[in-house]
Amino acid sequence: MSSFVELGLSEDIAHGVQSMNFIDPSPIQEKSIPVILEKKDLVASAQTGTGKTAAFGLPILSMLKSHGKLRALILEPTRELAFQVGEALKDYGRLTNLRTLVIFGGVGYDKQKEALNRGVDIVIATPGRLLDLLEQDAISLHSIQHLVLDECDRMLDMGFLPDVSKIIKKTPTTRQTLLFSATLPPEIQSICSWALIDPLRIEIGVLRSPAETVKHALYPVASNQKQELLLALLEKLHYQSILIFCRTKVQADRIAHELKKAQHLVAVMHADRSQGERTEALAGFKSGKYEVLVATDIAARGIDVASVTHVINYDIPGHPEDYVHRIGRTGRAQTEGDALTLITGEDLREVAQIEHYINQKIPREKVEGFNYTYTALLEQTEVVAEAAVPRRSLRNTKPANARRR
Ligand code: ADP
Ligand code: MG
């Protein structure tokens, strides 16, 4: 029998997982599942793409066994993640009669209320809409036995911790509480201290290192040639699907527009797109209808698209943590993926911080045959890499182009 059964999961669930072609549990699953089945509280961290959803989803489904009342609540930072986790739980639980409901904002209330009235066992929700429903007395959390705070660092980043705290207080203190996160910033520790009881801690891998299968590269370019270089890169790359990150919504729209003009199949995700548009973009990207998805950070964090072969940072992320999160979209579940970052003269500080953070020098590359306009950056293969080691020294270092000229 599969090792999922050996971890103590019920046969229904272990078989359900097997039919998804999960052969062996991932390390975070192997460690978390037995602890959760013992009803202990848990703080678990492992980098993006390591299978945290199944790590809490499988044991919860296994403990709930069959349809009854609402007993499990899973909080997610974004609607996309809530939807995705909902789909995963439906898949894992396909051999049970357990009912899941995904609750998120931006859509009408009626369907969610109707489903609640019919009765569900597991709710997967974003904090805002759940609080709305609680205020309207459309949902009660008094029978919750298992509470999961998923992607907790992301909920923190998005300013949801006050809402999350309110929700936690509406669940019984007898509940089991599970906290899953890619990283564990100090603010999360404070939640752990009041919301969890004597939690076990499981940390998998070096939290800071992005998936080891990912190849990184920097592409120096003059700022006015970024768009052109992006097009040239897309011509050169052998890709199945590419995620392109940029800083602003306006820019996301502009990039998508340019790529469409060049005959690429493109979708866009950012906070100003309607729920319908986002769902369509993501579904189309997953199905292969779109080969390129242009997104801002908020929109795309935690999205799992197994076939993403490349991530391109059109803009360098402002925080090294975001670099790691962004490229966590590729190289998932050990398939190879490439992470390419366009850099300009203004980005040297961020480059140094990222290289320091991931403790790795990122090679600089050029697109053969591309008609580069001159930027001193193109000639410096070492300066940034050297500066990357002691972060502080960088601020005192004159940009090398000053010296070269
Ligand atoms: P995380 O929440 O840690 O970022 P996910 O739970 O979204 O990661 O899982 C990432 C991907 O890995 C998903 O496509 C999932 O189906 C796949 N996956 C999870 N567990 C396994 C496993 N044991 N074997 C194979 N694939 C798995
Ligand atoms: Mg996750």
Image (cartoon, helix red, strand yellow):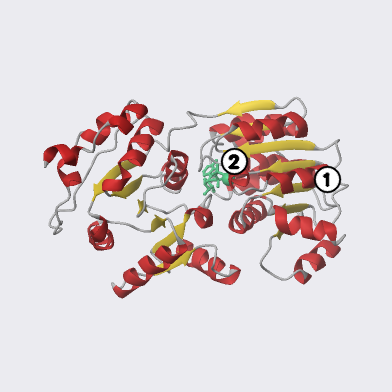
Q: Is residue 200 at all visible to an observer of this figure?
A: yes
| Coordinates of residue 339 in the picture (x, y in percent) | 35, 46
| Coordinates of residue 151 in the picture (x, y in percent) | 61, 44
Residue type at mark 1 is Ile
Determine which residue is flagged by label 2: 153
Disc 2 or disc 1, which is closer to the eye? 2
Q: Dot 1: few (<14), some (14–19), or many (≥20) neighbours within 10 Å?
A: many
237 sits left or right of 141 in the view: left
Task: Tell me: residue 398, above or below residue 390.
Answer: below
The quarter of the rendered structure image containing the N terminus is top right
Residue occupying image coordinates x 76% and y 56%: 130
Residue occupying image coordinates x 42% and y 54%: 307
The quarter of the rendered structure image containing the C terminus is top left
Corner quadrant of residue 113: bottom right
Foreground: 297 or 2? 297
Q: Please, what secondary structure does the residue beneath circle 2 have?
A: helix
Q: Please, what secondary structure does the residue beneath circle 1 have?
A: loop
Q: Quadrant of ligand 1?
A: top right
Determine which residue is flagged by label 1: 144
Between disc 2 and disc 1, whose residue precedes? Answer: 1
Label 1 near ligand 2 (CB < 8 Å)? no
In this rendering, the count of numbered labels is 2
